[in-house]
Image (spheres, rainbow, N blue to C red):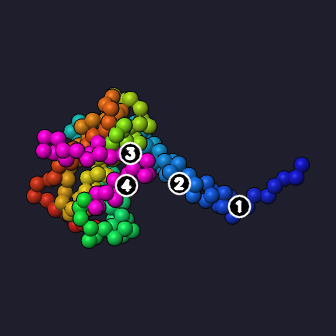
């Protein structure tokens, strides 16, 4: 039996072909790496009620990621001169198409609420664990919103599929008296 010779270029072509046709599957693999990081942090760092660790660590990491992706969206799609609504549409499309979740924008009791219908990728993958798990996504939303508006926001997850809710929902509140740069 003749043994086939495998080359790096051949493997690159094969992987490229799969990813071009199934890019979302590849992207979900990267999301699952973030999920692994979240779970590891929660397992290694004991919960501290005073500092809210590891929740704060995951939120702050998400905040930085939200700003990073926002900056990319600004540059890639020329959003600098676009309205907040248009900028938000690009972020929504990014979340939806990347598999993170399908977003609905709601107003409830005068507050802005982002609902991920059926839950975020992270909550769906974690399963029912009896508590909210989307700290990274909350931070991501805060970071992206800050980048888009130049104002600081706090985002709180008020419903989570992992806690037994039907959807993941996040309340977005502006921090009073603070501003930030838009990129």
**CA–CA distance in space, label 3 to label 4:** 10 Å
From the top left corner, tell me how far across and down residue 70 is, in percent: 33, 61
Residue picked out by circle 1:
10
Name above or below for residue 65 compared with residue 170. Answer: below
Q: Is residue 18 visible?
A: yes
Q: Residue at x 53, y 48 (%)?
A: 25
The answer to the question of whether label 3 and label 4 lie on touching residues, with beta carbons closer than 8 A, is no
Q: Secondary structure at mark 2?
A: helix
Q: Earlier in the sequence, mark 2 or mark 4?
A: 2
Residue designated by label 4: 93
- Which residue carries the number 3 mark? 101
Instruction: Tell me which numbered mark, 1 or 2, is placed earlier along the sequence.
Output: 1
Cα distance, mark 1 to mark 2? 19 Å
Nearest-to-viewer mark from 3 and 1: 3
Dot 2, how many residues are within 10 Å of its Cα: few (below 14), some (14-19), or many (20+)?
Answer: some
Q: What residue did someone put label 2 on?
A: 23
SS of the residue at dot 1?
Answer: helix
Q: Residue at x 36, y 45 (%)?
A: 102
Residue stretch in magenta: 86-115
As drawn, which residue projects farthest toward the right? 1
Q: Where the C terminus falls, by quadrant?
A: bottom left
Relative to 94, say whether 117 is above or below: above
Question: Dividing the picture into quarters, in which one does residue 65 lie?
Answer: bottom left
**Which of marks 1 and 3 precedes in the sequence?**
1
Location of residue 166 with respect to 86 vertically, above or below: above
Quadrant of the image occupied by residue 135? top left
Does 111 lie within the magenta span?
Answer: yes
| Element type where label 4 sits in the image | helix
If you read the primary sequence from the N terminus, does the residue marked by circle 1 or circle 4 appear first? 1
């Amino acid at each position: 039996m003749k043994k086939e010779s495998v080359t790096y270029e051949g493997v690159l072509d094969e992987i490229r072909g799969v990813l071009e046709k199934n890019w979302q599957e590849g992207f979900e693999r990267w999301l699952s790496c973030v999920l692994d990081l979240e779970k590891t942090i929660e397992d290694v760092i004991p919960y501290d009620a005073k500092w809210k660790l590891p929740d704060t660590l995951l939120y702050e990491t998400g905040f930085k990621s939200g700003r990073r992706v926002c900056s990319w969206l600004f540059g890639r799609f020329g959003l600098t001169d676009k309205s907040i609504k248009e900028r938000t549409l690009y972020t929504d499309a990014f979340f939806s198409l990347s598999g993170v979740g399908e977003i609905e924008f709601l107003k409830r009791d005068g507050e802005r609420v982002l609902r991920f219908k059926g839950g975020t990728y992270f909550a769906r993958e974690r399963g029912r664990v009896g508590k909210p798990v989307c700290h990274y996504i909350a931070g991501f939303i805060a970071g992206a919103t800050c980048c888009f508006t130049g104002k600081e926001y706090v985002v709180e997850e008020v419903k989570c599929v992992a806690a037994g809710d039907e959807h993941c929902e996040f309340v977005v509140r502006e921090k009073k008296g603070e501003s930030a740069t838009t990129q």
